[in-house]
Image (cartoon, helix red, strand yellow):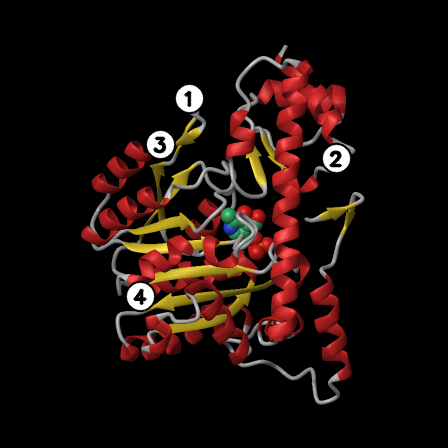
C-alpha cells in the first residue's frame, strides 16, 4: 500500500478515470464475457510485452482478465494442470508465501530451486542454475518478473540471459509473476525487461499481471493472464480452453477495476500521468531505503546494511532473525513478517528513526 502521511492513497489518475466512467452514461452492469474486457486484455498484453512485440503482432498471445495477480496465477495453474504434460512447477526459495498453495491447489506438483544466498544477501546464481539443470525437461519454472518478493533481489541482465538459456535449452516453460511492474525501477519498460527477453526468442511463456501495486487497485482485484504461444492457431485453441477453465471457477470477472485500467492505459494523457505517479511511488521507496540505511549508519548499528539500498522494490529482506523480529514487535511495536521482511512502502520519514532504533536494539 502506498501511504501518504500514513494513510492509504488513491492515485490521481485512478480518480480521474473513475470520474470519466461515471460521466459516461452508456456504461452498464451487465456480465462481461468469460475473459473480461477485450480492450483491457489488449492493453495489458502491450504493457508487459511492449508496443512493438512481435508475439502480439503475430497474434500469438491470448490474454484473459483475471482476479488480480493471485487469480491470474491460479487460472494459469489450472490451465497447465489440465493441458500441459509436465505437471511440475519449480518456484524459488524463498518466494511469496501464497505461491506454493496457489500452484498445489491449482493441480501442479511444487518443487523449488535455490534463489537467495543468506551469506551474501544476494542471488545464489550458481545454485539457481544447478537446480534448473537438474530439473526435468519441460518443467514449468516460476520467475518473479521484477522486485522479487520477499528478497528484493533480482538477477542482473546477464544473469537473466543465463537463466533464459538454461530454460530454453531444456524446453522448460517460464511462468512470470509480474506483480510490481514499474514499482521496482520506476520504469514500466525497465521492469518488463525479463519478460520481453524471453518473449523475444519466440518461445512460449505465461505471464500473470497484477494492477494491485502499480495502480494501487488492491481491492479492485484487477489482473491478467497472458499466454504467449508458438503460433496463432495454438493461441486460438489456448484461448478457448482458457474459457473452459475459467467458466466453472467464477464465470466471468468484475467490471469496475478493469474499466479503470483500460481507461488509463487507453488514454495518452492519463497514461503519461500514471507513469509520473508510478515513478514518484518508486522513488519514495528508494528514498526510504536510503533514509533507513543512513539512520543505521548514524547509530553505528553493527553489521553491513548495504543490502537495504541494493535490494529492489517494495520489500527489504533485512536478514534479521525470527528472535530479533519478535523482540522488535514486543518492545517497539514494529511489525513485519517473521522472515525479517519489511514493507518499505509502509515507511515514512517520520517512522524511519523509530525503526532504526528498533533494529539497533535488536542486533546489539
Ligand atoms: N505475486 C507476488 C510476488 C506478490 O507479492 C503478490 C502480492 O503481494 C501477488 C502476486 C498477488 O497480489 P494480488 O493478487 O493482490 O494482485
Going from N to C along the chain, the mark reached first, 4 or 1, is 4
What is the C-alpha distance between the residues marked 4 and 2? 50 Å
What is the C-alpha distance between the residues marked 3 and 4? 32 Å
The residue where tag 1 is placed is 119
* Vertical side of 14 occupied by 114: above or below: above
Q: Which of marks 4 and 1 is in front?
A: 1
Q: Is mark 2 on a helix, strand or loop?
A: loop
Going from N to C along the chain, the mark reached first, 2 or 3, is 3
Going from N to C along the chain, the mark reached first, 4 or 2, is 4
Q: Nearer the viewer, mark 2 or mark 3?
A: 2
| Residue 39 place in picture, x, y as percent | 53, 79
What is the C-alpha distance between the residues marked 4 and 1? 40 Å
Going from N to C along the chain, the mark reached first, 3 or 4, is 4
Q: How crowded is mark 4: few (under 14 residues within 10 Å), some or many (20 or more)?
A: few
Res. 215 in view: no
Q: Residue 354, located in which quarter of the rendered image?
A: top right
Residue under the image location 63 percent in, 10 percent down: 364
Q: Which mark is residue 349?
A: 2
Residue closer to the observer: 65 or 182:
182
| Residue 195 place in picture, x, y as percent | 39, 57
Q: What element carries label 4?
A: helix
The residue where tag 4 is placed is 83
Is 87 left or right of 330, judged from the image as shown? left
Q: Residue 124 carries which label?
A: 3
Tell me whether circle 4 and circle 2 mark residues in contact (CB < 8 Å). Answer: no
Amino acid at each position: 500500500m502506498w501511504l501518504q502521511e500514513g494513510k492509504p492513497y488513491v492515485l490521481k489518475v485512478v480518480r480521474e478515470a473513475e470520474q470519466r466512467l461515471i460521466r459516461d452514461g452508456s456504461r452498464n452492469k451487465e456480465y462481461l464475457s468469460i475473459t473480461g474486457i477485450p480492450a483491457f486484455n489488449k492493453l495489458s498484453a502491450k504493457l508487459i510485452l511492449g508496443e512493438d512485440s512481435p508475439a502480439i503482432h503475430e497474434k500469438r498471445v491470448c490474454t484473459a482478465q483475471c482476479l488480480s495477480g493471485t487469480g491470474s496465477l491460479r487460472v494459469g495453474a489450472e490451465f497447465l494442470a489440465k493441458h500441459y504434460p509436465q505437471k511440475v512447477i519449480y518456484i524459488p526459495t524463498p518466494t511469496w508465501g501464497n505461491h506454493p498453495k496457489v500452484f498445489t491447489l491449482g493441480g501442479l506438483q511444487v518443487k523449488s530451486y535455490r534463489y537467495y544466498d543468506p551469506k551474501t544477501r544476494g542471488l545464489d546464481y550458481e545454485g539457481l542454475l544447478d537446480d534448473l539443470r537438474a530439473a526435468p525437461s519441460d518443467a514449468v519454472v516460476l520467475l518473479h518478473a521484477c522486485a522479487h518478493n520477499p528478497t528484493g533481489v533480482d538477477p542482473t541482465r546477464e544473469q537473466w540471459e543465463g537463466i533464459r538459456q538454461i530454460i530454453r535449452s531444456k524446453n522448460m516453460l517460464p511462468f512470470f509473476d509480474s506483480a510490481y511492474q514499474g514499482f521496482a525501477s520506476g520504469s514500466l519498460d525497465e521492469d518488463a525487461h525479463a519478460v520481453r527477453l524471453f518473449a523475444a526468442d519466440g518461445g512460449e511463456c505465461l505471464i500473470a499481471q497484477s494492477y494491485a501495486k502499480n495502480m494501487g487497485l488492491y481491492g479492485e482485484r484487477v489482473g491478467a493472464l497472458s499466454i504467449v504461444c508458438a503460433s496463432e492457431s495454438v493461441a486460438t485453441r489456448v484461448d478457448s480452453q482458457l474459457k473452459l477453465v475459467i467458466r466453472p471457477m467464477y464465470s466471468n470477472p468484475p467490471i469496475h477495476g478493469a474499466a479503470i485500467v483500460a481507461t488509463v492505459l487507453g488514454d495518452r494523457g492519463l497514461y503519461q500521468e500514471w507513469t509520473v505517479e508510478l515513478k514518484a511511488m518508486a522513488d519514495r521507496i528508494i528514498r526510504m531505503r536510503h533514509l533507513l540505511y543512513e539512520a543505521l549508519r548514524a547509530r553505528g548499528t553493527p553489521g553491513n546494511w548495504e543490502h537495504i539500498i541494493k535490494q529492489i522494490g517494495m520489500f527489504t529482506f533485512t536478514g534479521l532473525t525470527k528472535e530479533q523480529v519478535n523482540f522488535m514487535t514486543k518492545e517497539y511495536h514494529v511489525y513485519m513478517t517473521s522472515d525479517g521482511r519489511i514493507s518499505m512502502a509502509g515507511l515514512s520519514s517520520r517512522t524511519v528513526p523509530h525503526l532504526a532504533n528498533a533494529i539497533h536494539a535488536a542486533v546489539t
